[in-house]
Amino acid sequence: MNTTFKTVASSNISISELMLPSHTNFSGKIHGGYILSLLDQIAFACASKFSGNYCVTASVDTVNFLKPIEVGELVTMKASVNYVGNSSMIIGIRVEAENIQTGKIKHCNSSYFTMVAKNKEGKSVAVPGLIISNLNEVRRFYNSLKQIALKKERDYHEEVFDYSSEESLTNIKKYNVQLELKKSK
């Protein structure tokens, strides 16, 4: 059993970066792929800081793009460990963009990355336990438990659901699709 515990606050990391024209997509907004790259970097830094080990991204569980980010805005990402397992951690990340001329700040993105701590040989290693210090941290922890349960339910559904059954093929017709299945040889 793990006897080392660290506070959520000990994992806190924030980064800020000015958004440049070179970061834009074809509509002139900041490219989502660029933001994803920054999210992965901060998730790595947060997980590595907390665990004291090299960490890899196991999954990106949620990325909600809420508002577009404009050229010239200062983007700040804040990350912390929300949940720890044996070798895994769920990192919550909040992205805010500030118009540096007006000072107006908008919440642009919330993301959750599952990171796994590794040793020098690439094997998963134990991470410290989590000290939860306030009700907001309790909320984040429980939301992570819910996220894990939903992921397990999705995986189970994928294993047991019969996509070829008469019922599922009939049910699909109520959606915006046209079913034109080819006979298998």
Image (cartoon, helix red, strand yellow):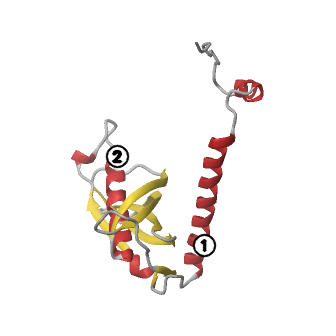
Q: Is residue 143 left or right of residue 38?
A: right
The percent position of residue 159, horizontal first and vertical second, equals 63, 42
Q: Is residue 16 left or right of residue 10?
A: left
Q: Is residue 4 left or right of residue 21?
A: right
Q: Which residue is mark 1?
A: 139
Please, is residue 40 above or below residue 12 in the view?
A: above
Which quadrant, please, contains the C terminus? top right
The percent position of residue 165, horizontal first and vertical second, equals 73, 27
Residue shown at 70% from the left, 27% from the top: 172
Q: Earlier in the sequence, mark 2 or mark 1?
A: 2
Residue type at the position of mark 2: Gly
Residue shown at 44% from the left, 74% from the top: 126
| Label 2 secondary element | helix
Q: Is residue 70 left or right of residue 94?
A: left
> 10 Å neighbourhood of mark 1: few (<14), some, or many (≥20)?
few
Residue 163, label in figure: none
Determine whether label 2 and label 1 are within 8 Å by CB: no
The percent position of residue 48, horizontal first and vertical second, equals 34, 71
Which residue occupies the foreground of this view, 99 or 17? 17
| Residue 147 falls in image quadrant | bottom right
Please, is residue 64 above or below residue 25 in the view?
A: below
Which residue occupies the foreground of this view, 100 or 110? 110
> 10 Å neighbourhood of mark 2: few (<14), some, or many (≥20)?
few
Residue type at the position of mark 1: Arg
Can the viewer see residue 102? no
| Label 1 secondary element | helix
Q: Which residue is mark 2?
A: 33
Measure the alpha-carbon separation of dots 2 and 1.
29 Å
| Residue 50 falls in image quadrant | bottom left
The percent position of residue 59, horizontal first and vertical second, equals 45, 54
| Residue 158 falls in image quadrant | top right
Please, is residue 40 above or below residue 87 in the view?
A: above
